[in-house]
């Protein structure tokens, strides 16, 4: 198959509005999974769409032989919501190419990246009649909502999914043309708290000064998550944190200036973060506490003089190796309850959570991936961790007992999760080359 056809098919895949958070799109996720299943069957694999209590999982495999390695390639066909829609230059589900770059929701995260693997496999089967390894594709539709059903699915299908190593292209490159091997990810733990005060919104003139304002309390609790040095103020939060190793700090310090890159990519007027660490260390190797949303009270035009009856905040903690999401949620809950005054009540709801992941970057599998990256880009790869989370990767280790090689091709300006998400055609083509080189490198390992 030629590159034009691969691109046409990628555009078909990108046109499915497979937004996993919103139940309105459930049927679109199903259609997307169905399309992938048909595609995988058409290239000579045996593919099946498996229902789950949420969105379907697609599994495809070639004929497995006992004399070769088994490689599982994971990807996700679900995407993030598209709002604010008015900031998109072209419609998110009508892929558009401008200056060699594909603009569409899911182009980088993650359809473009896993579809490059599918195209690589299709080409190899077409040209060689077979693959150098036993292959399993595992494509899920719930990554962006924390993969709530995938771990149970792994346990149920553990025999079928038995493999030597896993490959995931859902991470980034530090710069265009710089091959990047990611050996670690942060974990995550989410919670939401609701502060409840008066039974109904009160007239702030009549009662103001005599009762607590839930929005003020919510803001104080949020403000109290950090101290003046940007350390997280939750007691015990850092107890289990594994420190960065000196080789990592040295290698990351040798990368292009992370502070400058962070300033440029985010367009903030200045940086702020935990004292004693560089931007890259803060982003890849240190835990955080973030407010993802905060609200309560009047949001309309003009002023409305009330004491709102309630206010809320949605928090997420990015975690590093050593930290347990369940323990962090307990500590956070204890902290919030301790600092919440008795003049209001607090309700706390835990959300999704997942462990951080780190593998030995210098293992044989790691080196094979780095060699494939080197050949794909004709440049030496850099070794990094990433700050984002793919919680199922730790479950792969716990349930299937294998490591995951992260060879993502996202660029710093890919705008994942944001308007105008994009993926260069050059990176899509590099992904197709990488698939072939990587499967061969893995096949050649003793
Ligand atoms: N592709 C990302 C993960 C990622 C982001 C890796 C940045 C490396 C750098 C993935 O699709 C994602 O967005 N994950 C979520 C997981 C969460 C919903 C459990 C994340 O990190 O917020
Ligand atoms: Zn994502």
Image: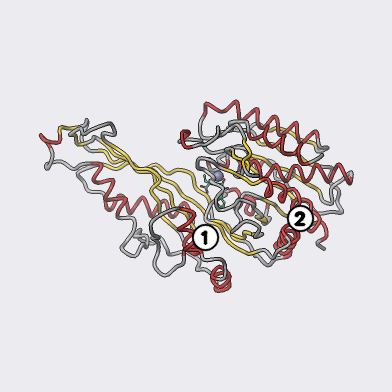
Residue 430 numbered mark, or none: none
Residue matched to label 1: 284
Q: Does the image show residue 148? A: yes
Q: Nearer the viewer, residue 29 or 398?
A: 29
Q: Position of residue 247 (x, y in %)?
A: 58, 73
Q: Nearer the viewer, residue 265 or 279?
A: 265
Q: Nearer the viewer, residue 176 or 310?
A: 176
Q: Residue at x 78, y 55 (%)?
A: 437
Q: Position of residue 307 (x, y in %)?
A: 19, 36
In which quadrant is the C terminus drawn? bottom right
Q: Nearer the viewer, residue 432 or 230?
A: 432
Under tag 1, what secondary structure?
Answer: helix
Residue matched to label 2: 438
Q: Residue furthest left?
A: 206
Q: Position of residue 365 (x, y in %)?
A: 73, 61
Under tag 2, what secondary structure?
Answer: helix
Q: Residue at x 36, y 62 (%)?
A: 230
């Amino acid at each position: 198959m030629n590159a034009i056809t691969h691109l046409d098919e990628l555009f078909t895949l990108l046109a499915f509005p497979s937004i996993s958070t919103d139940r309105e799109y459930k049927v679109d996720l199903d259609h997307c999974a169905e399309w992938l299943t048909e595609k995988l069957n058409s290239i000579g694999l045996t593919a099946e769409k498996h229902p789950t209590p949420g969105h379907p999982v697609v599994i495809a495999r070639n004929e497995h032989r006992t004399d070769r390695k088994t490689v599982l390639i994971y990807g996700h066909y679900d995407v993030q919501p598209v709002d604010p829609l008015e900031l998109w230059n072209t419609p998110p589900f009508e892929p558009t190419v401008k200056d060699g770059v594909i603009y569409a929701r899911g182009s980088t995260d993650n359809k473009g990246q896993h579809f490059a693997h599918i195209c690589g496999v299709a080409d190899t089967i077409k040209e060689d009649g077979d693959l150098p390894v036993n292959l399993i594709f595992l494509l899920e539709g719930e990554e962006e909502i924390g993969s709530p059903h995938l771990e149970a699915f792994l346990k149920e299908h553990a025999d079928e999914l038995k493999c030597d190593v896993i490959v995931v292209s859902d991470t980034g490159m530090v710069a265009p043309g710089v091959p990047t091997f990611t050996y670690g990810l942060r974990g995550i733990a989410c919670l939401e708290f609701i502060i409840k005060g008066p039974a109904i919104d009160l007239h702030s003139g009549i009662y103001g000064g005599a009762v607590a304002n839930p929005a003020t309390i919510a803001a104080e609790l949020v403000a109290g998550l950090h101290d003046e040095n940007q350390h997280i103020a939750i007691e015990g939060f850092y107890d289990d944190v594994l420190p960065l190793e000196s080789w990592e700090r040295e290698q990351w310090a040798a990368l292009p200036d992370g502070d400058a890159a962070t300033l440029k990519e985010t367009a903030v007027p200045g940086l702020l973060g935990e004292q004693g660490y560089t931007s890259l260390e803060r982003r890849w190797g240190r835990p955080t506490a973030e407010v993802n949303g905060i609200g309560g009270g009047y949001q309309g035009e003009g002023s409305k003089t009330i004491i709102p009856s309630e206010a809320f905040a949605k928090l997420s903690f990015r975690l590093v190796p050593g930290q347990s999401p369940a323990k962090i949620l307990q500590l956070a809950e204890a902290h919030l309850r301790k600092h919440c005054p008795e003049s209001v009540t607090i309700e706390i709801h835990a959300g999704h959570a997942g462990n951080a992941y780190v593998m030995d970057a210098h293992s044989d599998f790691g080196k094979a991936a780095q060699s494939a990256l080197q050949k794909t880009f004709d440049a030496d790869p850099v070794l990094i961790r990433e700050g984002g989370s793919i919680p199922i990767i730790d479950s792969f280790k716990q349930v299937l007992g294998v490591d995951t090689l992260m060879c993502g091709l996202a660029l710093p300006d890919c705008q994942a999760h944001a308007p105008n998400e994009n993926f260069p055609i050059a990176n899509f083509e590099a992904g197709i080359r990488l698939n072939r080189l990587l499967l061969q490198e893995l096949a050649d390992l003793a």
